[in-house]
């Protein structure tokens, strides 16, 4: 247990569905992240939030919409996804965005888009 | 843009020592982290180097040479449970991850 929880752990959705991924951290951290991990590819950083404000969006398609209502919760809203969006979506948190911060990862949501 | 190079796969026997190398691009570099990820699991943090030299944590050590834009993770007294993927991650303005090195430990 890293102190970062994600729900659901598994999700199957059609291309016309709308779903949301939830991440919660119990570590008192200020920064939260969404990553995508596809088979045989490096981890891809999608979004970064610091003190609830988005500080980074790495050219992520608009069908992925993040939301950070407070420093402990992070959501990823999904709509009209494509099969190539099937991947493991990982949430992480760190104390701050300073150099050398340790990121603590949740267990991930394994997403399959049909 | 920044990218990291690390071997895709390494095989070693129980009790041995293995070194996983990682080269990175220098511009804007702050430090190098290492993460372990078992199949089906999430990455877990192992170490971070911002300065040159060796950082030791139990059986795992990490080394950085900023002048050579190079670091490595050293795993000693290998155990079967060390079979996993190991990622280096370089901190720039944002963090960039390598593609991972899959370590197979054989009996």
Image (cartoon, coloured by chain):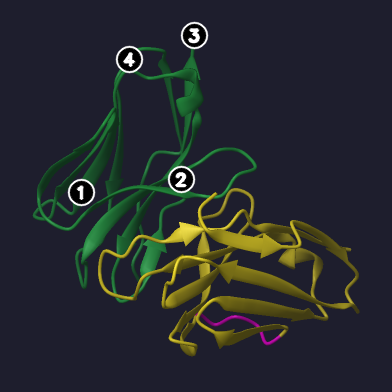
* Mark 3 → mark 1, Cα distance in angstroms: 30 Å
Residue farthest toward the top in the current orientation of the protein: B107
Question: What subunit carries mark 2?
Answer: B
Query: Residue B59 location, x and y as percent?
Result: 29, 27
The chain coloured yellow in the image: A
Assess whether mark 3 and mark 4 are in contact (beta carbons under 8 angstroms): no
Q: Residues within 10 Å of mark 2 (few under 14, many from 20)?
A: many
Shown colour of chain B: green
Taking B50 as reference, is B74 above or below it?
above
Q: Position of residue B29 (x, y in %)?
A: 22, 67
- Res. B107 mark: 3
Q: Nearer the viewer, mark 1 or mark 4?
A: 4
Q: Residue at x 58, y 85 (%)?
A: A68
The span picked out in magenta is: A58-62
- Do marks 4 and 3 share a subunit? yes
Mark 4 crowdedness (10 Å alpha carbons): few <14, some 14-19, many ≥20: few
Distance of mark 3 from mark 2, alpha carbons? 23 Å
Q: Main secondary structure of the magenta part?
A: loop
Indicate the quadrant where residue A81 lies: bottom right
Q: Secondary structure at mark 3?
A: loop
Secondary structure found at label 2: loop
Front disc: 3 or 2:
3
For marks 1 and 4, give the CA distance: 23 Å
Q: Chain of mark 1?
A: B
Say which quarter of the image contains residue B6: top left
Left or right relative to B92: residue A22: right
Mark 1, residue position? B70
- What residue do we see at 35% from left, 60% from top? A102
């Amino acid at each position: 247990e890293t102190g970062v929880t994600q729900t659901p752990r598994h999700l199957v959705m059609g291309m016309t569905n709308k779903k949301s991924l939830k991440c919660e951290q119990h570590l008192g951290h200020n920064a939260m992240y969404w990553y995508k991990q596809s088979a045989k590819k490096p981890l891809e950083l999608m979004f970064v939030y610091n003190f609830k404000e988005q500080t980074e969006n790495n050219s992520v398609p608009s069908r992925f919409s993040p939301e950070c209502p407070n420093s402990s919760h992070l959501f990823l809203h999904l709509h009209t996804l494509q099969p190539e969006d099937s991947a493991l979506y990982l949430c992480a948190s760190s104390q701050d965005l300073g150099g050398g911060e340790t990121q603590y990862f949740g267990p991930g949501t394994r997403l399959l888009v049909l | 843009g920044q990218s990291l190079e690390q071997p895709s796969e390494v095989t070693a026997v129980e009790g041995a020592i293995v070194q996983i190398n990682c080269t990175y691009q220098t511009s804007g570099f702050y430090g190098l982290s290492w993460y372990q990820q078992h199949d089906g699991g999430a990455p877990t943090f192992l170490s971070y180097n911002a300065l040159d030299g060796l950082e030791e944590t139990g059986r795992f050590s990490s080394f950085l040479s900023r002048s050579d834009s190079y670091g490595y993770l050293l795993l000693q007294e290998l155990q079967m449970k060390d079979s996993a993927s190991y990622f280096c991650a370089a901190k720039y303005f944002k963090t960039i991850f390598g593609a991972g090195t899959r370590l197979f430990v054989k009996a």
